[in-house]
Image (cartoon, rainbow, N blue to C red):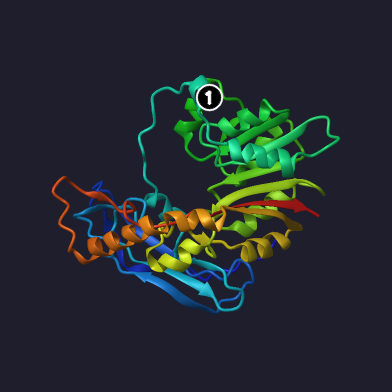
Amino acid sequence: MTQIQTSQTKPLQQEVYKSKNTEQVFSVVRENIACVCCGSNDNKQLYHYDAEYFDHEKFETYSWDGGFPLDLTIVKCNDCGMVYQNERFTEESIGALYPHHPLPEKLDYSRLMRHHKFGFFLNMVREYASPSRLPKRTALDVGTRYGVLPELLNHRGYKAFGLEMNLKAVKLANEAGFSGVHHGTLLDLEEVMKKEHVDRLNLVSMIDVVEHLLWPQRDFEMISQHQQKGDKIIMSTMDIDSLGHKVFGKHWYFIHAQHTFYWSEKTLGALLDQFGYDLKYVHRIPKYKNLRILPQEMMKLRKHKQHLSGKDKYFENGKRWFAEQRPSLFDYMNVVAEKR
């Protein structure tokens, strides 16, 4: 088992918080962690956001800080360049920072399958990740929501299933006819694989997941134990080395409390290498498409700064969503890693 370093957790000075959005009260605990890529404790502060960075009377901030007046610090490892939240919220505390959006009472299977948004991802699977000479290819989707992606993969010759933390979403998916949607996290992987009668994972997909992990070393080690040479992991995550982050810095759309790690091709590749993977393909949107939308995003940045300074008077119609004017470009990268 890979050794994961963390110092003793400690409560914040002001331990108990009350949400201005939900009237919820909870105690926050944070922990100081070492860099997950190289194990170093030598880092520098990249950004710090004070507890009242957003005015809670004017902004809905439940994704930013759970609606609680919490400060946020982002650091950068001095040895390998990994960017991450530190001190970061513990697993028990961070759950309160996730919004509890109301879910529908019933899902429409046919509609979800017709109007899915996995076309690009499925093309990437076909081109870069389809194993050959296997009687039945297996696939796991981590953070699967309703299980649309595993269902699409099942229609393409896989035995696919998914893991989802939201129990209600799992129940809705099963009632609607989506197969193989299991409640749990990667800690439940072995139990779920037994239920699915699977002993190997040819493909693991993680779309908008890896930036949320608390212990990515632990999670990738568990995945690696169930993959063999030639098996793939496909991930989609924001790129900290992207043009958008370089231009917008502290005001970049993707920075908030739910995102614990901010990956680059270099740091993600370094972590995966520890568990026997090589990066085979990294896809990014062409730069000219970013340049086309740069002027409008610069206007967003201007409005965002006006909001923060209190000079924007457009709050008569209720609270604004915290991310409404936070700018970004096409800052995602899609990564294919292959087990050696």
Residue type at mark 1? Answer: Arg
Which residue is more in the foreground, 327 or 201?
A: 327
Specify whether residue 74 is in view.
Answer: yes
Is the C terminus in the top left, top right, bottom left or bottom right quadrant?
A: bottom right
Please state the horizontal and vertical placement of residue 106, each as a whole percent of the image. 42, 22
Q: Residue at x 55, y 42 (%)?
A: 143
* Residue 86 sits above or below residue 122 on the image: below
Compared with 102, 73 (above or below) is below
Identity of the residue drawn at 37% across and 64% down: 251
Q: Residue 151: where, in percent of width, then height?
A: 61, 28
Q: Nearer the viewer, residue 281 or 290?
A: 290
Q: Quadrant of the N terminus?
A: bottom right
Q: Check disc 1 and report the residue beneath it.
A: 114
Q: Residue furthest right?
A: 133
Q: Residue at x 60, y 25 (%)?
A: 179
Residue 151 versus residue 125 in the image, above or below: above
- The answer to whether 86 appears left or right of 1 in the picture is left
Q: Residue at x 54, y 65 (%)?
A: 241
Left or right for 7, reference 339: left
Specify few, some or many for label 1: CA neighbours under 10 Å numbering under 14, 14-19, or 20 or more.
few
Residue 254, percent from left and from top:
44, 57
